[in-house]
Image (spheres, grey):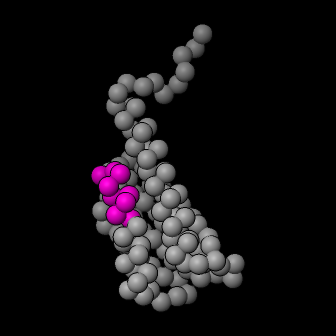
């Protein structure tokens, strides 16, 4: 998995960079379909914002998290994107196992 980290209106420190890479290792363990993730960290008037776009096989997932602390925003972001990846993985496995896309008509 390729991980790109960008900072808007802030300087990316080694501590934040390592924190993001450590958190996204969890996602890599859950699914091997993730090819690339682009994380954008920014400081806004409302607080700290973290957003990610994950490219998975056959789809692109997006998540956004805002918090008063950058580390809390990153934690929220990882939780959101992880849920989306697990849901995408479940759908893919169900499709491969013959699940139907629509309910049968009566």
- Indicate whether residue 4 is drawn in magenta: no
Question: Where, quadrant-wise, is the C terminus in this rendering?
Answer: top right
The span picked out in magenta is 24-32
Indicate the position of residue 104 as horizontal and vertical percent values: 54, 16
Above or below, 9 against 54 in this view is below
Name the residue rendered at 47%, 44% in the picture.
Answer: 87
Decide if residue 97 is on the left or right side of residue 6. Answer: left
Overall secondary structure of the magenta stretch?
A: helix
Indicate the position of residue 60 as horizontal and vertical percent values: 45, 54
Indicate the quadrant where residue 37 lies.
Answer: bottom left
Indicate the quadrant where residue 70 lies.
Answer: bottom right
Name the residue rendered at 37%, 60% in the picture.
Answer: 26
Q: Nearer the viewer, residue 40 or 20?
A: 20
Decide if residue 35 is on the left or right side of residue 49. Answer: left
Q: Nearer the viewer, residue 95 or 85?
A: 85
Indicate the position of residue 59 as horizontal and vertical percent values: 42, 50
Question: Where, quadrant-wise, is the N terminus in this rendering?
Answer: bottom left
Q: Is residue 36 visible?
A: no
Decide if residue 81 is on the left or right side of residue 57. Answer: right
Indicate the quadrant where residue 76 lies.
Answer: bottom right
Seen from this angle, which residue lies furthest top? 106
Q: Nearer the viewer, residue 5 or 102?
A: 5
Name the residue rendered at 34%, 31% in the picture.
Answer: 96
Q: Nearer the viewer, residue 72 or 13?
A: 72
Above or below, 42 against 82 in this view is below
């Amino acid at each position: 998995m390729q991980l790109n980290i960008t900072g808007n209106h802030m300087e990316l420190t080694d501590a934040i960079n390592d924190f993001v890479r450590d958190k996204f290792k969890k996602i890599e363990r859950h699914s091997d379909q993730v090819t690339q993730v682009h994380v954008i960290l920014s400081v806004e008037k409302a607080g700290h914002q973290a957003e990610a776009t994950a490219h998975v096989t056959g789809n692109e997932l997006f998540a956004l998290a805002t918090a008063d602390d950058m580390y809390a925003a990153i934690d929220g972001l990882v939780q959101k994107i992880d849920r989306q990846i697990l849901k995408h993985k479940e759908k893919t496995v169900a499709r491969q196992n013959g699940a139907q896309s629509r309910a049968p008509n009566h």
